[in-house]
Amino acid sequence: MENKRNSISILFYTGYVFLLVLTIFFGLKFQASLYLNSQETYEVFPYYLSKSIFPLIIGVFLAAPHLYKTFTKTGKWKLDWVKLIVVGLPFIYLSIVPILYYSEVLDLNLPFSSYAMGGYFGGSASTSFETINGIIASYIVLTSINKKGSFLKDCC
């Protein structure tokens, strides 16, 4: 029985990694095509929108095993407010600021917007900073959701 469970786990994680690699590959190819299109048409919003949203998608993908385990558990839904507010909120803010800036939704100088836009780090470091913010933001939001059951139901 244990060998069968290990085989299923190996197949599941192999498929999961394969889908993650495919998502990254095709997402980056799509982003590169948007970048080339923005150079030709001077329409930069679609490129910057994908640059902000794609890391959020990767964070969701990384949180998927946690979500699966949470959905299959019994118990009441709980939200870890401390984790969400203390850790998640700053990263959510930093990942949304570029979208707000390029969509021109808000014409304000938002706090820490130069950091969020990568201006503090400059050059290619700004892309890494935006990517890290997006991945952490969506991962923290989704892993803040959990189910808590009674001790007897979970252990026995």
Image: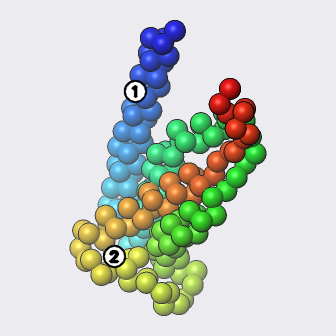
- Residue 136 drawn above or below residue 104: above
Point out which mark residue 118 bears: 2
Tell me which residue sits at (73%, 48%) in the image.
77
Residue that mark 1 sits on? 14
Characterize the local packing of mark 2: few (<14), some (14-19) or many (20 or more) Cα atoms within 10 angstroms: many
Q: In which quarter of the image is the C terminus?
A: top right
Instruction: Work out how far the residue at label 2 is from the one at label 1, CA to CA, in angstroms.
Output: 35 Å
Residue 98 coordinates in the image, percent (x, y): 46, 74
Q: Is residue 24 above or below residue 100?
A: above
Residue 125: horizontal and vertical position, in percent?
A: 26, 69
- The one nearer the camera, 39 or 130, is 130
What residue is rendered at 34% in x and 62% in y? 35
Question: Which residue type does callout 1 highlight?
Answer: Thr
Q: Is mark 1 on a helix, strand or loop?
A: helix
Left/right placement of residue 98 relative to residue 145 reads: left
2 and 1 marks in contact (CB < 8 Å) = no
Instruction: In the rendered view, tell whether residue 113 sits above or below residue 1.
Output: below
Q: Which of marks 2 and 1 is nearer the N terminus?
A: 1
